[in-house]
Image (cartoon, rainbow, N blue to C red):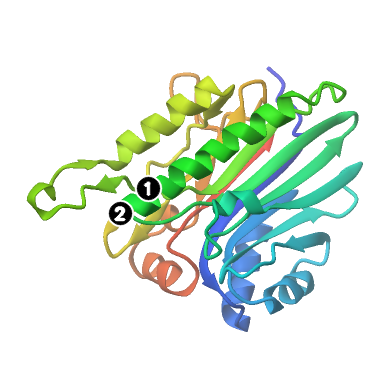
């Protein structure tokens, strides 16, 4: 059976407190170039100079950077000349009224006569009640955006939405010491996210690795992709075990190479997808 052609590919990656630095910059650029995405979003950009540096390292891409009072920004790049049109917008409502949190970075692009919308998102981190509540509200903003796109009836496929990023699904620890062992665990938060996505006409995409983050607390499944149910993505797995998201970076390494990647590049792996329809 012939392979479906790829309309475009997209990558999302939290590179953890990225301020540049020539050695790290080249390793980050090499990781991106090795997967050759048509679109990518980088999370936790902490210096505006990173934009200029990435333009130097990846000259075939155009870029946009969120901008606000928060310390960490989101950098989005897209291959020059690949798309009929591209529109970048900063979705400030995703900081849910907290100026320290990141906005959403929305890139809308046209392939032939169809528009696709990609939202790169970095939700609040923490197992405390405020962080958990902020994440829930951010996810609520995602479903609201999907409904707004659904109402754009003048565009045949305007509702095609792909959400990628570090969604920090780490659960909730009960705040009172007497009940400190009671919690909403991370798998429960992920299951609730999947259920809410389905109710909003979206779905949580399966990945080819169980964990995306590797740090002092162990390994966690923090980074995810949500997509409109009508959106078709390449399956890198099998019919029995589908995997529409390729997780790349530290999961493929061991020993000294693993330690080097975590220490010098990022404790998050990147997420990669190919849209085919």
Q: Which residue is mark 2?
A: 128
Q: Residue lying furthest top in this view?
A: 1
Please report the residue visible at 58 percent of the width from the left and 32 percent of the height from the top.
143
20 lies above or below 187: below
* Residue 273: quadrant of the picture: top right
Residue 208, percent from left and from top: 46, 38
Q: Residue at x 39, y 36 (%)?
A: 190
Say whether residue 112 is left or right of residue 192.
right
Image side of residue 39 versus residue 47, left or right: right
Could you tell me which residue is drawn at 52 percent across and 32 percent down?
205
Label 1 sits on residue: 132
SS of the residue under disc 1: helix
Whether residue 226 is visible, yes or no, is: yes
Q: Quadrant of residue 92?
A: bottom right
Residue 60 falls left or right of residue 251: right
* Image height of 237 relative to 271, above or below: above
Residue 277, given in percent of the width and then of the height, sits at 74, 25
Q: Residue furthest front?
A: 97
* Circles 2 and 1 in contact, beta carbons < 8 Å: yes
* Left-right relation of 138 to 260: right
Q: Residue furthest left?
A: 178
Q: Nearer the viewer, residue 244 or 114?
A: 114
């Amino acid at each position: 059976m012939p392979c479906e052609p790829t309309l475009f590919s997209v990558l999302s990656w939290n590179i953890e407190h990225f301020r540049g630095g020539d050695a790290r910059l080249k390793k980050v650029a090499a990781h991106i170039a090795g997967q050759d995405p048509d679109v990518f979003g980088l999370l936790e950009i902490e210096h505006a100079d990173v934009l200029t540096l990435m333009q130097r390292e990846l000259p075939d891409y155009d870029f946009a950077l969120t901008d606000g009072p928060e310390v960490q920004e989101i950098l989005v790049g897209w291959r020059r000349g690949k798309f009929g049109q591209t529109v970048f917008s900063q979705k400030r409502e995703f900081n849910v009224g907290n100026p320290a949190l990141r906005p959403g970075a929305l890139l809308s692009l046209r392939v032939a006569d169809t528009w696709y919308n990609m939202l790169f998102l970095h939700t609040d981190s923490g197992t405390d009640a405020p962080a958990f509540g902020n994440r829930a509200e951010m996810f609520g903003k995602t479903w609201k955006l999907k409904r707004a796109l659904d109402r754009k009836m003048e565009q045949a496929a305007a509702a095609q939405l792909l959400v990628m990023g570090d969604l920090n699904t780490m659960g909730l620890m009960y705040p009172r010491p007497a009940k400190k062992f009671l919690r909403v665990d991370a798998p429960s938060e992920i299951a609730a996210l999947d259920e809410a996505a389905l109710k909003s006409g979206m779905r949580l995409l399966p990945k080819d690795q169980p964990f995306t983050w590797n740090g002092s607390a162990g390994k966690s499944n923090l980074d995810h992709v949500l997509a409109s149910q009508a959106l078709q993505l390449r399956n890198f797995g099998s019919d029995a075990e589908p995997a529409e998201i390729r997780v790349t970076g530290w999961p493929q390494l061991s020993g000294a190479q693993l330690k080097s990647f975590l220490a010098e590049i990022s404790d998050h792996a990147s997420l990669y997808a190919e849209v085919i329809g």
